[in-house]
Image (cartoon, rainbow, N blue to C red):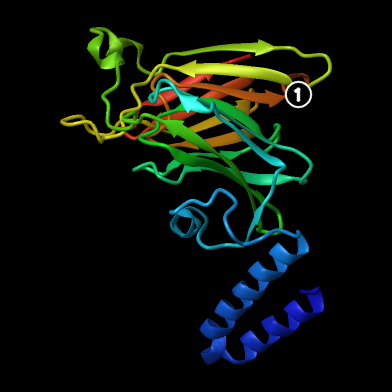
């Protein structure tokens, strides 16, 4: 759809307010069809998930989607430990990415993590909990509002989301809550890699008698308080989570991690 045609539709909407709801539906459908035709991609889910239509609605609000191999989601063929499944998401060659959403179609809690790369690379790696075999996907939103979606099937014996955290069996888990350790790897030919671990049980609320208790937000800032990247994590992120991100560390004067869990406990730690 050309820009001139879009402007004509918007003009009609402004002058015919009673017709706005119907025109908006038609406009969104045309945009979705145009995006998929432009990228030569089918609307049909390439992973053939029974829940794709549901997650498209719940996670991406039925917005325009392109299935794109440049959004790479790496998981093991088989989840040997359903409470600690490694996953990495890397987006390359699409342009500026405003947000990345990672989700598992068949998990009882489908949202895993939202990542706003901001001033760092559109790459993140961590571990999460899985309840059963499921497609694991990442959707990367570009400035035009289109979600570029990639994913992989993950085989799993399951049960990771309904199992209690192991850390609660330790007497001192409350004393270490929110503790952070980090390390930066300098790499000559690529952006540096920053890895940090946060002590937290990350309870899903699905284990009997244990309420949900998890980290909600994390922010990476420089020492002047300028936001570098933002993470919204959900219950399926693994206990005592490790996060890895890529960035040009020489561009920033110090990196500080700020965060908060759903009970209001704060995280404030200098990483670099």
Asked whether the viewer can see residue 80, the reply is yes
For label 1, count other residues whose C-alpha is less than 10 Å away and answer few (under 14), some (14-19) or many (20+).
Answer: some
Q: Quadrant of residue 226?
A: top right
Camera-side residue of 25 and 228 = 25
Residue at far right of view: 189
Residue at far top of view: 171
Q: Residue at x 66, y 88 (%)?
A: 12
Camera-side residue of 143 and 155 = 155
Residue 135 as seen in the image, left or right of residue 138: left
Asked whether the viewer can see residue 225, the reply is no
Vertically, is 233 above or below 248?
A: below
Camera-side residue of 14 and 200 = 200
Vertically, is 132 above or below 195?
A: below
Secondary structure found at label 1: loop
Q: Residue at x 52, y 82 (%)?
A: 21
Q: Quadrant of residue 20?
A: bottom right
x, y (%) of residue 235?
37, 35
Camera-side residue of 33 and 3 = 33
x, y (%) of residue 107?
38, 41
**What is the total number of numbered labels drawn onto the structure image?**
1
Residue 52 as seen in the image, left or right of residue 254: left
x, y (%) of residue 223?
64, 22
Vertically, is 13 above or below 161?
A: below
Q: Residue at x 41, y 30 (%)?
A: 156
The C terminus - image quarter: top right
Residue 200 as seen in the image, left or right of residue 162: right
x, y (%) of residue 134?
45, 40
The N terminus - image quarter: bottom right
Residue at the disc numbered 1: 248
């Amino acid at each position: 759809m050309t820009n001139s045609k879009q402007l004509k539709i918007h003009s009609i909407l402004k002058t015919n307010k009673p017709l706005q709801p119907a025109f908006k539906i038609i406009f969104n459908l045309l945009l979705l069809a145009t995006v998929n035709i432009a990228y030569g991609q089918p609307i049909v889910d390439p992973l053939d998930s029974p829940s794709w239509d549901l997650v498209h609605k719940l996670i991406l609000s039925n917005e325009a989607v392109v299935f794109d191999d440049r959004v790479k989601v790496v998981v093991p063929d088989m989840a040997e430990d359903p409470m600690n499944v490694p996953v990495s998401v890397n987006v390359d060659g699409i342009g500026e990415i405003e947000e990345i959403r990672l989700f598992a179609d068949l998990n009882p809690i489908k949202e895993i993590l939202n990542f706003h790369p901001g001033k760092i690379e559109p790459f993140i790696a961590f571990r999460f909990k899985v309840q059963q075999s499921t497609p694991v996907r990442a959707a990367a939103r570009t400035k035009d509002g289109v979600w570029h979606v990639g994913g992989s099937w993950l085989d799993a014996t399951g049960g990771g989301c309904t199992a209690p955290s192991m850390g609660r069996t330790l007497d001192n888990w409350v004393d270490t809550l929110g503790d952070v350790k980090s390390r930066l790897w300098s790499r000559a030919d690529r952006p540096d890699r920053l890895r940090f671990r946060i002590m937290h049980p990350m309870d899903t609320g699905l284990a009997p008698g244990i309420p949900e208790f998890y980290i909600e937000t994390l922010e990476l800032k420089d020492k002047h308080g300028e936001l570098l990247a933002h993470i919204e994590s959900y219950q399926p992120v693994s206990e005592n989570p490790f996060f890895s991100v890529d960035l040009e560390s020489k561009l920033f004067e110090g990196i500080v991690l700020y965060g908060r869990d759903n009970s209001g406990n704060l995280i404030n730690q200098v990483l670099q």
